[in-house]
Amino acid sequence: MGCRKAWELLMRRMDGEIDRQNLRYLENHLMICPECREKHDSLSAVLMELDRTKPAAPESTEPKVMEKIRSVRHRETPLFLPYVVPAAALLTGILVFLFYEYAMDGPMAMINKAAQTLTIFYGAYQSVAAFSRFLFGSVYLNGVLIMTGLALLGGIPAFLHGQRVKRGVSKYWRSVK
């Protein structure tokens, strides 16, 4: 067995991953080869010194680590998520409603309704932004509140308008029949 193979077996022995047969080969090689025996002795001395002088962690380390773990756990769920999902669902409902109206009334009625809805949204945005500036001092600090308010304030008039138009259409169809 060569010195290169002995070095590989020596590393496996240090890791505790050597079988009996290879351990015998390594021990025989170490008896024969003074260079490998010197490497083995110096490596063993270094490892023993490392084991002997392992620094102990300060007692304050564990509480600090546990506090960091607890703080990370609290940040896992975004706080705004329960507010964004209903607002997004409402906004999706409004868009579906508007596209339904487009299919029923034609493009010009849809453009007119979209313009009315955007005007309502912009007015609601200005109101919520002014209120947010008054309460929090910044429009950007409470963006989720603004978007939720816009979706709610814009969705209600659009829904009521759609119901009014729908009733008119149904009256028309009853008179034609």
Image (cartoon, rainbow, N blue to C red):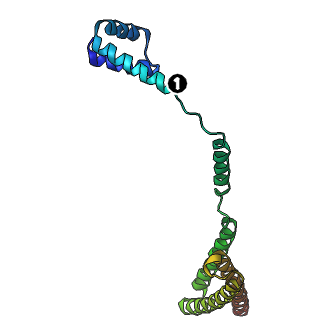
Q: Indicate the amino acid at tag 1.
A: Arg
Is the N terminus in the top left, top right, bottom left or bottom right quadrant? Answer: top left
Occupied quadrant, residue 85: bottom right
Q: Nearer the viewer, residue 105 or 129?
A: 129
Q: How many numbered marks are there?
A: 1
Q: Secondary structure at mark 1?
A: helix
Is the C terminus in the top left, top right, bottom left or bottom right quadrant? Answer: bottom right
Residue ID at (42%, 24%): 46
Q: Nearer the viewer, residue 115 or 127?
A: 127
Q: Look at the picture and state if 25 lies above or below 143.
A: above
Residue ID at (66%, 65%): 81
Specify whether 158 is left or right of 114.
right
Rendering coords of residue 114 (x, y %): 59, 88
Rendering coords of residue 99 (x, y %): 58, 81
Rendering coords of residue 150 (x, y %): 66, 82
Residue highlighted by disc 1: 52
Q: Look at the picture and state if 68 lies above or below 30.
A: below
Q: Residue 9: tell me if it is visible.
A: no
Q: Look at the picture and state if 176 lies above or below 71.
A: below
Q: Residue 23: tell me if it is visible.
A: yes
Residue ID at (55%, 33%): 55
Characterize the local packing of mark 1: few (<14), some (14-19) or many (20 or more) Cα atoms within 10 angstroms.
few
Determine the residue located farthest toward the left in the rendered image. 2
Rendering coords of residue 146 (x, y %): 66, 80
Residue ID at (39%, 21%): 43
